[in-house]
Amino acid sequence: MPKVSVIMPVYNVEKYIAETIGSVLAQTFTDFELLVIDDESKDQSIEICEGFTDARIQIIHQKNRGLAGARNTGIRHAKGEYLAFLDSDDVWRSQKLEKHVQHLDANPAIGVSFCSSEFIDDDSQPLGNYQIPQIKNITPELVLCRNPISNGSVPVIRKAVFQDIEFIDNFYGTEEKFYFDDRFRQSEDIECWIRIVLTTKWKLEGIPEALTLYRVNSGGLSANMMKQLDSWEKAIAKTRTYAPKFLAQWESLARAYQLRYLARRAIRNQDRQAGVALVNRALASNWKILIYEPRRTFLTIFAAYSIWILPRGLYNSIESFALQLTGKSQRKAIAKNKA
């Protein structure tokens, strides 16, 4: 039996999938199975997967169920003690599994191990900035408001955690076990993390290294951001059904952080109207983000109104300089955490 089951949903990623699988096969920790979940991909992705001859790879085909449904299929088939998740356009550094296995083996109370991420572009070139979450003292309110498990390619989770949150339902004509909620086509991850931290005994903890290379999508129009906000609101509504007192205390602050995050996405896409509208909504939801995270909040406000007012060329120059400074600061933070 493998120690780790790597679960990789695949849907129309022929440009990236070979690099992604290669990063799994290059792991220094080798006792794993790689479950490739074909979510009814329409391009050549699965043919590329079939070109790999490593016996640890198993391809599982299913009718399209989305990311949550593909992950659930992987969990049902997984034989490993630990389940690692990797989106099929992202990349792992070679010590990713080794570091997480060591972390979980040494800390039996930790159910979810995660890491920092470095951003890369469509051509796998580093963008010079990182996602650096808080890694210790993970509370339910931190998961709700700041989601330290920042993307779907960072967590390695004990299979026992999923056994504790499984539920049975009939979404496709027969009763099945579910872990992520198949009804969510977005925000399925944060809904699951909140459910874990609110309904189980398991602890969440990170390790400091940036072991995941997270690919930044060059798209992302306002309509997609609004879909993401809508799905987040649905995740909040579900959480309210079993944790109403918790949400009464933290919901407005969590919404402010979510709106600020979407404002930053709009700014990156140079969507002037959406950036200003979203940052204003964030402050209206809970102005205390100015107190709790003043630097990031004021920078978001400044960027939103700058892109609204300034000529495009001048704004781009300011943004490029700011990103260089941010990248240097983040690299220092990662080096300090590793020390």
Image: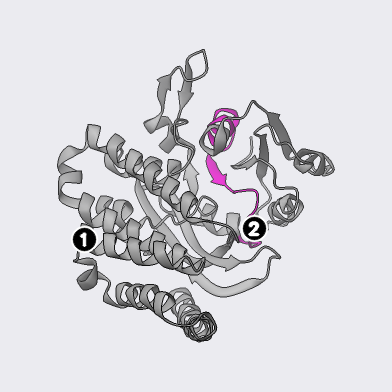
Disc 1 residue type (three-letter): Ala
Q: Within the image, what quadrant is residue 22 found in?
A: bottom right
> Of 221 and 69, which appears nearest the observer?
221
The tag earlier along the polypeptide, 1 or 2, is: 2
The vertical placement of 228 against 103, above or below, is above
Quarter of the rendering occupied by the N terminus: top right
Is 281 included in the stretch rendered in magenta? no
Disc 1 on helix, strand or loop? helix
The vertical placement of 245 against 168, above or below, is below
Q: Which label was assigned to residue 284?
A: 1
The residue indicated by pointer 2 is: 91
Q: Position of residue 28 (x, y in %)?
A: 68, 58
> Of 278 and 26, which appears nearest the observer?
278
Which residue is rendered at x = 54% and y = 42% of the image? 83
Q: Which residues are magenta?
A: 71-95
10 Å neighbourhood of mark 2: few (<14), some, or many (≥20)? many
State yes or no: discs 1 and 2 in contact (Cβ < 8 Å): no
The vertical placement of 26 against 8, above or below, is below
Nearer the observer, disc 1 or disc 2?
1
Q: Is residue 193 visible?
A: no
Which residue is rendered at x = 41% and y = 52% of the image? 107
Left or right side of 135 for 48? right
Disc 2 on helix, strand or loop? strand
Q: Within the image, what quadrant is residue 57 found in?
A: top right
Disc 2 residue type (three-letter): Val
Q: Position of residue 120 (x, y in %)?
A: 62, 66
